[in-house]
Amino acid sequence: MKVTTNTMNGEEKDNIIPNLMYISQESGGDDSDCSTSDESYVSDKSLAKTLNIGTDTIEVVNKPKVIGHRGAVYQEVENTLEGFKKCAELGCAAELDVFLLKCGTLVVFHGQGSDECPGGLQGYCGIDGNILNYTAEEARELPFNPEHPEFQCPKHKIEGVQAFIPTLREVLEIAKSTGLRLKIELKGPETSEPSLNLVEELDMVDQCHFSSFNHKRIARIRELRPEKNSDGTHKIRTGALFKSDVPDNFIDMCIEAGASDVHLKYDTCTTERVQEVHDNGMGSMAWFRGPTGMNQDLNEKYFDVESEDRLMYSYVMSTGVKQLCVNKPDVLIDLLDSI
């Protein structure tokens, strides 16, 4: 498959992604089950068709930045110190989720539930309740459930002593020492100001971006820190997250919230939307669901790709999106290195 890539210095080159149509992490290089057929594209079960892209030649306008979704979840437990260390080792950024607990401490955790009511512990820890009902000290002692399908790393790491719910301060300190860049999703209520204050306290503004599905939270960041750089970009970068149903007025919503970036779900990240984002002076990111959600999508919606294989990533990045927040950052990095 031919890929046209414009490099950072503006020079254009043509290259071939080796065995892009067939090689995936899951298949181990066996091409018997991974090829894309014309039938899958013309059906409604096609990611390429959903994104409205061709498949004969994939044009990669720019190499997107790689962000590990909740760390490196196929290698380490999500949202843990070891997972973020792995991202630093891989040389990519990391995304994480933040809650403010009743003791006043910010912790890094995802949990179950909707974005309107997140932080459930039933599946993640095998107990009733919500992370918001705990102190940081109590949360640190909560066990992770090794049978939960969202945990895709080796089981011995889930049960190990290093698998615990860390504080945001601990994660920031690791990021500062390693140069790891972070996307901080303001998951829980009342997280905007304390997260901003902690990032500024540690002098890490240039390393950290803030995002949320609740646009009031990033609007609060912008209200507190409206300052811009000499080139017109905001000193504090924020991302407006969107789910599957992207409103027609999503650009207006982002502008109203003062967002510097627009974060679209991977299968809503069409070329047209990405171009509209860039035309309005904002950055773009495609985010992938957690492992459980991605497996559901691949079983029910998209039959032309494997779960976060090289082909899936190539389809999404061909839309021109500038950042990909993925569960398998090592696979994406390997793909980009081959271009």
Image (cartoon, rainbow, N blue to C red):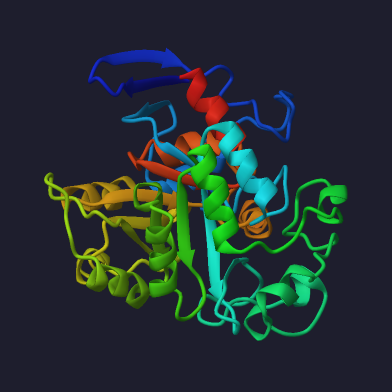
Residue 10: image location, x then y, percent: 22, 20
Residue 43 in the image: x percent, y percent?
52, 48
Name the side, left or right, on which 18 lies relative to 253: right
Q: Residue at x 32, y 13 (%)?
A: 13
Q: In the image, 232: left or right of 7? A: left
Viewer-proximal residue, 247 or 36? 247
Q: Which residue is more in the foreground, 173 or 143?
A: 173
Quarter of the view holding residue 258: bottom left
Q: From where the camera sits, is residue 309 visible?
A: yes
Relative to 32, say whether 237 is above or below.
Answer: below
Quadrant of the rendering where the C terminus is positioned = top left
Closer to us: 190 or 174: 174
- Position in image of residue 197 (x %, y %): 39, 67
Q: Residue at horizontal 64%, vertical 26%?
A: 23
| Residue 28, quarter of picture | top right
Return the residue nearer the eye: 271 or 209: 209
